[in-house]
Image (cartoon, rainbow, N blue to C red):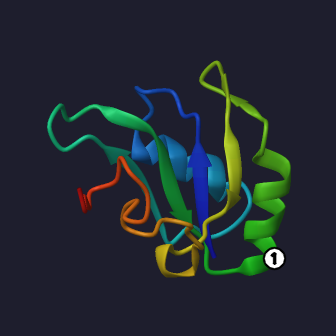
Amino acid sequence: MNIYVGSLHFKMKEEELREVFENYGEVSSAKIIFDKYSGKSKGFGFVEMPNDAEAKKAIEELNGAEIGGRKIIVNESIERAERKSNFRGGNNDRRGGYRRDN
């Protein structure tokens, strides 16, 4: 199961994130997302756990837990393809959109 972890301390290392989740079972990977321009942490990451039961227990017990002085957000990650969006590519049927008929 892929797990989203948000509100991380900006100085947290991937090894530390992995150790937190290893208390609940096997961790396949732990990745913190960094800004490609500044190289600084964006304050969130993802943890992959192969055992769904262990992953669900980790989510249940770690969501809202304080780590590094911050209350973290932990939930099951939703793949981008599964997300629903209302984005229609612009506002082309009313004035103010990208398409002008006048």
Tell whether 13 sits left or right of 58: left
Tell whether 95 sits left or right of 59: left
Amino acid type of disc 1?
Answer: Ala
Tell whether 95 sits left or right of 40: right
Label 1: few (<14), some (14–19) or many (≥20) C-alpha neighbours in 10 Å: few
- Is 58 or 88 nearer to us in this picture? 88
How many labels sit on residues?
1
**Measuring 60% from the left and 73% from the top, which residue is drawn there?**
84
> In x, y percent, where is residue 21?
64, 54
**In the displayed image of the protein, which residue is found farthest to the front?**
102
**Measuring 63% from the left and 46% from the top, which residue is drawn there?**
20
> In x, y percent, where is residue 97?
34, 53
- SS for tag 1? helix
Rendered position, 81 above or below 63: below
- Is 84 or 51 nearer to us in this picture? 84
> What is the quadrant of residue 91 in the picture?
bottom left
**Measuring 50% from the left and 72% from the top, which residue is drawn there?**
28
- Is 22 or 55 nearer to us in this picture? 55
Disc 1 marks which residue? 53
**Which quadrant is home to the N terminus?**
bottom right
Rendered position, 39 above or below 94: above
> In x, y percent, where is residue 101?
25, 62
> In x, y percent, where is residue 13?
40, 38
**Measuring 54% from the left and 34% from the top, which residue is drawn there?**
8
**In the displayed image of the protein, which residue is found farthest to the left?**
37
> What is the quadrant of residue 37 in the picture?
top left
Rendered position, 20 above or below 93: above
Tell whether 83 sits left or right of 42: right
**Which quadrant is home to the C terminus?**
bottom left
